[in-house]
Image: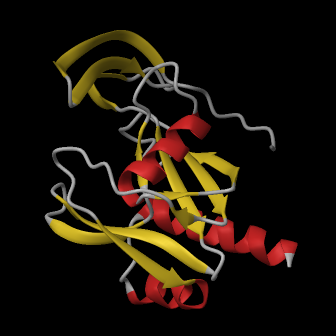
Amino acid sequence: MTESNLKKWKILSSQLVIEHEWCKIRQDQIELPNGRVIDDYFINIRPEIVVILAITPTQEIVFVRQYRHGVTEILLELPAGNFEKKIEDSFEAAQRELVEETGYEVECLIKLATIYDNPVKNNNKTHIFLGINAKKTTVQSLDITEEIEVVLIPIKDIVNQVISGEICVAGTIAAVFMGLEILRQKS
C-alpha cells in the first residue's frame, strides 16, 4: 500500500443513541484534521457478515431470491448472513448460513477477501467465500423473517445477469467477480 499524508478523524465523544437488538446507532462528535468539529456524525453499528459463492459440480452458482424490506424489492443474491455468536469465526458463519438458507454444503471453503460494504456510515466487515462442490444435503432452516427461493444459475450466465441488473447487490457482485477470477486463474 502506498504512503499517504491523510490523517484520521479524532473522536471527541461517542454515545449510543439507539440500542436495540436489530439496530444500534452511535453518535460521534469528531474533529476533522483541519480542526473543524462535527457534533452529529452517526454510525450504524452492524454485525460482521459473510457472503458465499457456492459452485455445484455442474458449474452452477447457488443463489437465493428473497424480499429485502430496506429497498422493498425481491432480489437475487448469494447466500449471506450475520455472525450469530461472538465466538463464531467467519468460516463457521459461512458454512452455517449456506446450509440454513439453501440446504447446500460445500466440500471446500476458501476465503477470498474481507471488504467494507459502506464504510461511510457502517462499521462492519463483509467476509467473502468461495465454496467448491456444493451439494444439496438437507432442507432449509430459515429465520422467522426469511422466505427464500434457492436458484441455481450456470456460471456462464452470471456476468450477463450482473450487467442486465438482475443481480444488483454489492456484496454479491464483489463475490461473483472475485470468485470468477480465482476460477479463471485455476483453469
Whether residue 161 is situated above or below residue 69 in the rendered picture: below
The residue at the point 15 percent across, 56 percent down is: 69
The residue at the point 21 percent across, 30 percent down is: 23
The residue at the point 21 percent across, 71 percent down is: 74
Whether residue 172 is situated above or below residue 99 in the rendered picture: below
180 and 132: which is toward the camera: 132
Q: Quadrant of the C terminus?
A: bottom right
Residue 160 locus on image (x, y percent): 50, 91
- Dividing the picture into quadrants, the one containing residue 31 is top left
Whether residue 94 is situated above or below residue 45 in the rendered picture: below
89 and 165: which is toward the camera: 89
- Colouring scheme applied when the structure was drawn: secondary structure
Whether residue 161 is situated above or below residue 99 in the rendered picture: below
Residue 63 locus on image (x, y percent): 43, 70
Q: Can residue 126 be seen in the rendering of this structure? A: no
Residue 136 locus on image (x, y percent): 49, 65
Answer with left or right where residue 101 lies relative to residue 72.
right
